[in-house]
Image (cartoon, grey):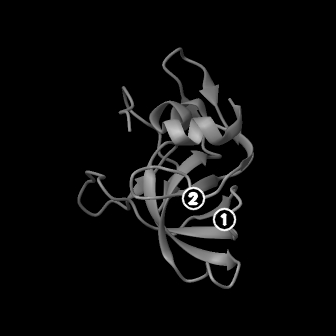
Amino acid sequence: MKGIAGRQMRGLPTGARLECIDNTGAKIVQIVATPKLKGTRRRYPKAGVGDMVIISVKKGAPDMRRQLLKAVIVRQRRPFRRSDGTMVQFEDNAAVIVADNGDTKGSMIKGPVALEAAERWPRIAATASTIV
């Protein structure tokens, strides 16, 4: 995992629901926690593109539901600034379920993946069909 330079615009607070875009069987997931986030007192923890989060599967295959898993956020609706000055915004919020070391659990990823997530997680970049 690589670090992200500069300040990151985090647009997904704890409790946000995301679409799961891999073929693991989960459809809708909810953010439970954001580990390794150094927050501020009384501020709700948030996550952004490229962050690893702990999620709970809300909709999907019966064997996947109600499990706590780790996922990486690959798209967010909140606009964020890249280092070259361009603002990037996606149509939806999406995540990919990963193992503890960052390997993807599914074998394919549907839809585009943000460049920041692909640079930080090489296994996601290898599995993604489109990197934006």
Q: Is residue 44 left or right of residue 118?
A: left
Q: Where is residue 30? Give x, y as percent.
A: 56, 69
Q: Where is residue 21? Give x, y as percent.
A: 70, 55
Amino acid type, callout 1: Thr
Q: Give the quadrant of residue 124.
A: top right
- Number of the label disc, if any, that sits on residue 24: 1
Q: Give the quadrant of residue 105.
A: bottom right
- Number of the label disc, if any, that sits on residue 49: none
Residue at 45 percent across and 35 percent down: it is 120
- Mark 2 highlights which residue? 105
Considering only vertical position in the picture, is 104 above or below 113?
Answer: below
Q: Could you tell me how many numbered marks the image carries? A: 2
Q: Where is residue 41? Give x, y as percent.
A: 23, 60
Q: Residues within 10 Å of mark 2 (few under 14, many from 20)?
A: some
Q: Where is residue 61? Give x, y as percent.
A: 71, 79
User: Do residues under tags 1 and 2 come within 8 Å of each other at their CB atoms?
Assistant: yes
Residue at 56 percent across and 65 percent down: it is 16
Could you give the CA–CA distance between mark 1 and mark 2, rounded to whole angstroms?
Answer: 7 Å
Considering only vertical position in the picture, is 63 above or below 6?
Answer: below
